[in-house]
Amino acid sequence: MLAVASKQALAVFPETAPEPFPASQLEETRPLESGGHLVLFSPVREINNEIRSDVMARLPVSGNSLLYRINTDSSRVNALNYYRQALLDSGANILFECSGVRCGRSNVWVNQIFDKSMLLGRDTAQDYLVTGTVSEDGQRWLTLVYTVTRGNQSEYVWVEHFEVGSGAVVPGLGSLESRIRGPLTVAWRDGFIVRFDWQSQDRRMLLDWADADGSTVMLITYSELEGSEPLEDAMARARTAGESMSDLLVQTGIVKERQQLVVVGPSIIQSDPNRKGNRVEIVVISR
């Protein structure tokens, strides 16, 4: 008994959930044991009363769900930033995050994903973050953080922290030896200058990935053939987009010496519907 108690006392992340946001109060702890717990790695949609998401998985899990009410002198934005930084500092990898209406409808998240109706809030006032960690013994842990502002202006954080059963496939989370992160897909448009469709959280995620010493940032550029356009022109457009993205990354602190450009153009067709069109796929490979 003493040995068990000592082990529990010494347990740290990822075996235990992240330390709670200081300006919050714990209101509920719920055991989370399931052979098929639904976890989303992309925005949620509801079509004909069915949950749809481009990347999702039903996983065997063991852990806890925790509900915190945020103090009135703080905010859910502060709480989200706290958890995000704490998880990154602990070695977790961000697998997906979204904010506001980009996440989907709050009603679907709280009622059909988390089964916690009291979290219902405005679609514009919600955030979702899912991170993954591989412990030294090879066990995989996920931490989900959902923040919301309710109609009465009260703010909450919902945290799920659990171990994933062996053999399950977790999108974006490899084994202990995994050195590849990505791809982060950024659409681009032709014009006087190349324009990229990416969000601030995408840039933050890339910087987190590239933070490791010796990592290489791969820029893999794709283009679609336009009508009777010659292949050479499509390849040239893809190269221009890649070089423009490279220049943008230099401005964020990722020097060209750490980058590698691979121009694919229209020469490879992906079956994944999310990997279509003019785009740059960014992959970070650690040393």
Image: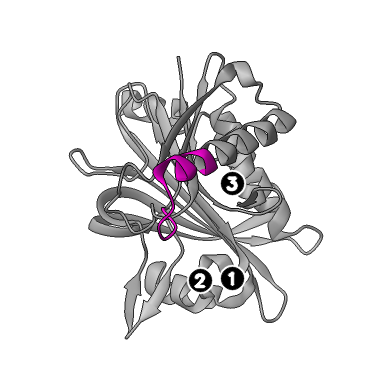
Decide whether residue 156 is among the magenta residues.
no
Horizontal side of residue 284 vs 69, given as left or right: left
Secondary structure of the residue carrying tag 1 is: helix
As drawn, which residue projects farthest toward the bottom? 48
Secondary structure of the residue carrying tag 3 is: helix
Decide whether residue 226 is among the magenta residues.
yes
Q: Taking 115 as reference, is 93 above or below it?
A: above
Image quarter of residue 77? bottom right
Quadrant the C terminus occupies? top left
Q: How far apart are the alpha carbons under marks 3 and 2?
A: 17 Å
Q: Please name the residue shown 17% across and 39% down the image.
A: 167
Mark earlier in primary sequence (3, 2):
2
Instruction: Identify the disc placed on residue 81.
Output: none
Of residues 190 and 157, the one nearer the viewer is 190
Horizontal side of residue 1 vs 76, given as left or right: left
Residue identifier under label 1 = 101
Q: Please name the residue shown 31% across and 54% down the image.
A: 272
Residue identifier under label 3 = 202
Q: Are marks 2 and 1 in contact (CB under 8 Å)?
A: yes
Image quarter of residue 72? bottom right
Bin the neighbour count of mark 3 within 10 Å (Cα to Cα): few under 14, some 14-19, many 20 and up: some
Disc nearest the viewer among 3 and 2: 3
Q: What is the three-letter code of the residue carrying label 3?
A: Asp
Residue identifier under label 2 = 104
Quadrant the N terminus occupies? top left
Q: Please name the residue shown 51% across and 75% down the image.
A: 105
Looking at the rendering, the stretch of residues picked out in magenta corresponds to: 225-237
Mark earlier in primary sequence (1, 3):
1
Q: Taking 29 as reference, is 119 above or below it?
A: below
Image quarter of residue 180? top left
Q: How far apart are the alpha carbons under marks 1 and 3?
A: 16 Å
**Image colouring:** one colour
